[in-house]
Image (cartoon, rainbow, N blue to C red):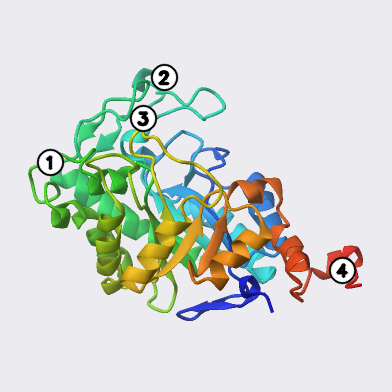
């Protein structure tokens, strides 16, 4: 049996294989609501055999959106449409997960296929918030430094969002602390120059994340998996790096986090990132080895053999695919054929299954 198709049990939730759909923004919501696009987009990946399907970065508040078209979970009214999606994903033998997010200083921008630039407040935009009033890049807004009440609200927003996620039928939750969004901005000394208890030392810079985790755990069941996505490095001198990530991993493990989703970058517009197939896998491997926590590998993984090797060699416990899943929704079904794994197909598709000659 292929290692990639061995089940993975995390707490009381069993993934049928080690293939997951990475959260990918679709910028296709109105007022935060899921719709038919999301049902078909995520549902087709469940039909395609992925063991875990993670909903895109979902804003915990209106001001936490990247764009006006972001998915949202700040209102109880969002639950019904999300439940429709989780119900279908679960019916296909996959597990539905959701990534909870706040955009921080990257908020109030247009969709990437428009121009990705700032939406002024007089054109329907909103004030971006950040640990420090440091602009991300030209074309983005000048963020406001968050006050104590702002921080309290964000912590409460993540807790409320987690409660709604549970009601909507998600069985895996992931806190987005990567890619230069709000929590990552607090972690990195490149974007956090505060002098209070949320800035300065490593312990202070990780404080918002640990307080969010503590708050979320009050509503998220102990028997359901709890993930955190991090950027394992800023790819910049003086920024967040792998040793910081390993140190954080130990804290997260002690906080009850089950798995770290290991991405990189996103906090510095001019960072030089050595993008290549599997270029982030070594971070997942190092964090897993040095902290003992489970990890997910992500980033330019687009081949069944490549994914299999990651699991066989113990570099990560789970492989999350993004762009390849956009190109090939049925990646898992095809990977099983390539690797000789005998898995079940949707009965509606069995007639198209190739023989094992």
Closer-to-camera residue (192/167): 192
Residue under the point 48% across and 67% down: 316
User: Dot 4, crowdedness within 10 Å: few (<14), some or many (≥20)?
Assistant: few
Q: Can see residue 114? A: yes
Separation (CA) of disc 1 from disc 3: 22 Å
Image quarter of the N terminus: bottom right
- In the image, residue 95 sits, relative to residue 148, either above or below, namely below
According to the picture, the residue beneath numbered tag 4 turns out to be: 350
Q: Earlier in the sequence, mark 1 or mark 3?
A: 1
> Mark 1 to mark 4: distance in Å?
58 Å
Pointers 1 and 2 in contact (CB under 8 A)? no
Report whether residue 35 is seen.
no
Name the spot of residue 153 as percent of width and height, x first.
24, 49
Label 4 element class: helix
Answer with mark 4 or mark 2, whichever residue precedes in sequence: 2
Who is closer to the viewer here, 295 or 66? 295
Helix, strand or loop under label 3: loop
Q: Nearer the viewer, mark 4 or mark 3?
A: 3
Helix, strand or loop at label 1? It is loop
Q: Residue at the spot x=74%, y=74% of the render? A: 341
């Amino acid at each position: 049996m292929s290692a990639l198709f061995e089940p993975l049990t995390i707490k009381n939730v069993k993934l049928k294989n080690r293939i997951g759909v990475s959260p990918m923004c679709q910028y296709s919501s109105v007022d935060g609501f899921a719709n038919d696009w999301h049902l078909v987009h995520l549902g087709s990946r469940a039909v395609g055999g992925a063991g875990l399907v993670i909903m895109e970065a979902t804003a915990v508040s209106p001001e936490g959106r990247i764009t006006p078209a972001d998915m949202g979970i700040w209102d109880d009214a969002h639950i019904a449409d999300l439940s429709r999606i989780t119900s279908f994903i679960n019916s296909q033998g996959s597990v539905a997960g959701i990534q909870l997010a706040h955009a921080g200083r990257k908020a109030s921008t247009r969709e990437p296929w428009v121009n990705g630039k700032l939406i002024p407040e007089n054109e329907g935009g909103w004030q971006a918030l950040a640990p420090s009033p440091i602009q991300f890049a030209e074309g983005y807004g000048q963020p406001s430094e968050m006050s104590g009440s702002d921080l309290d609200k964000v912590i409460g927003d993540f807790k409320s969002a987690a409660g709604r996620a549970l009601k909507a039928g998600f069985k895996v939750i992931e806190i987005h602390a990567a890619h230069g969004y709000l929590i990552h901005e607090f972690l990195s000394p490149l974007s956090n120059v505060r002098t209070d208890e949320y800035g300065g030392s490593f312990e202070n810079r990780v404080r918002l994340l640990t307080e969010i985790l503590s708050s979320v755990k009050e509503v998220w069941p102990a028997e359901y998996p709890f993930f955190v996505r991090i950027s394992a490095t800023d790819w910049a001198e003086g920024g967040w790096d792998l040793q910081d990530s390993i140190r954080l991993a130990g804290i997260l493990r002690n906080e009850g986090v089950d798995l770290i989703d290991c991405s990189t970058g996103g906090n510095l517009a001019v960072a030089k990132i050595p993008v290549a197939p599997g270029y982030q896998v070594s971070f997942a491997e190092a964090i897993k080895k040095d902290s003992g926590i489970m990890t997910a590998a992500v980033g330019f993984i687009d081949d069944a053999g490549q994914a299999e090797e990651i699991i066989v060699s113990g570099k990560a416990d789970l492989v999350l695919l993004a762009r390849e899943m956009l190109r090939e929704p049925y990646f898992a079904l095809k990977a099983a054929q390539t690797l000789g794994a005998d898995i079940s197909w949707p009965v509606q598709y069995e007639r198209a299954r190739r023989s094992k000659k």
